[in-house]
Image (tube, helix red, strand yellow):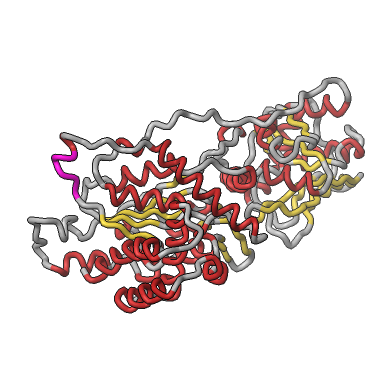
Amino acid sequence: MFSRISTVSFQGVDAANVDVQVQISSGSVHFTLVGLPDKAIAESKERVRSALIASGLALPAKRLTVNLAPADLPKEGSHYDLPIALGLLVAMGALPAEVVEDYLVLGELSLDGSISHVNGALPAAIAAVSQDKGLICPASCGSEAAWADENLKIVAAQSLVQLYRYFKGDITLSDPKPRSSPQAAPTLDLADIRGQETAKRALEIAAAGSHNLMMVGPPGSGKTLLASRLPSLLPPLSARELLEVSMVASISGELEDGALSNQRPFRAPHHSASMASLVGGGMKAKPGEVSLAHNGVLFLDELPEFDSPVLDSLRQPIENGVASIVRANYRVTYPSKVQVVAAMNPCRCGYAGEPGHTCRRGDKCASSYQARVSGPFLDRMDLQVHVPAVSVKDLISPQPSESSSIVAQRVARARATQLSRFTSMGLDITVNAHANARIIEQIVALDNESKALIERASTQFGLSARGYHRVLKLSRTIADMDGSEAVQRIHLAEALSFKRSSATLAAA
């Protein structure tokens, strides 16, 4: 007696096909699992046995062998329970093979026979669509899987008994519907920030072109407040971006009740975070914060307090938009197209350069503290702005400030301009920050006066080739915000003014 059930193994956000082969043969009573299973899968035979008994079905007193093919692909996770159980039911003759042969199956079994939630329902559903198959999954995963395709046949059951009775024709199951998270009213508004007009301008430019931003200033100057208002300036996720973000969240188990949200991710890991938690990794190679923030914002507060190797490990994911986790026996990639916002104090005591303050350790206080952040990491910051302490006058008698909704409209117009430009060029790019050097040189044609300006600035600030192209991207975004077809000298000068902050910081 032999049966086959189709399921998947998750390789990053991709789903690789796995064939669950079940054989019941004569011989000593034994239940064997082969095919490079991890500990969770090896323990599934006890969960499957108990779930079948709780459902009124007992395993035969024969030799049971389950093979997870391909045998050389490492398998991990508890979602193999349900495929194994269905394979046993088919091999025992309790279910006809044809009723399950056109489905991908995943689900974890409880000892009482109920089917528990598992991660990765959305990538599995997308794999089922590509193979023109249906999907059998836990009831709690149904609404998540329904986002893959409206024509996808989904059987979302609460228990093994319910699934058995459905295939026997005794009951019907309703088709799950896609569910969205309710959009909460924004509570953080840019109008709450007193003063800091230069920093607000930098925040708007960063939002318009998805540029990386670093803010340097004393404690209490509003760096964290500014960063927390950035999501209120960003447009909602497009359909494609929503799918990409949700697939990473699904693999990580961070989709609440299977509901998707079109709000951009905002991740703010603590500075004690490890390299694996930021980039990804661990025993099961899970996505890190840089991937969970895909198509959104990664906020690094107290930047020099992060371990230097941890910060430097972010350089490749930030630059390439992909986090690659390589181990001896596998290689996994997760998307990591993020906008990095960093905040730091100028020195250990926090007040270097502030009027009326002198560090007790002198210039060494600032230089040793800033040296904790490497030059290559700083080179990836498009805008570096000084955020001075807010005066008491600004707090007592605040000037009228623009709300996030008004600024978000300008950001949306600038992004629409960029999308239209890249679409007309036949490029799959949405914002200036994601354009490569060749493309940015093509869309930024500098006149002689601007070329002379950036040549002088390059010598004065020591711009690298990367820094040069990032200045061009920044100036293109500023021109888009002004509605200008060409990048003019004034746009380039403003872009360079934010690089001047980095030169001043390095000199300190």
The answer to whether residue 106 is visible is: yes
Of the pair 165 and 390, the residue shown nearer to us: 390
Q: Residue at x 56, y 71 (%)?
A: 438
Q: Quadrant of residue 74?
A: bottom right
| Count of residue discs | 0
Q: Quadrant of residue 428?
A: bottom right
Which residues lie in the magenta part?
389-394
Q: Locate the C terminus and report the quarter of the image it occupies.
A: bottom left
Q: Residue at x 38, y 41 (%)?
A: 229
Q: Residue at x 50, y 65 (%)?
A: 319
Residue 127 in the image: state x and y as whole percent.
Answer: 75, 48
Of the pair 422 and 264, the residue shown nearer to us: 422
Q: Quadrant of residue 324?
A: bottom right
Left or right of 190 in this view: 13: right
Figure check: 66 above or below 366: above
Residue 370 in the image: state x and y as whole percent.
Answer: 26, 65
The answer to whether residue 277 is visible is: no
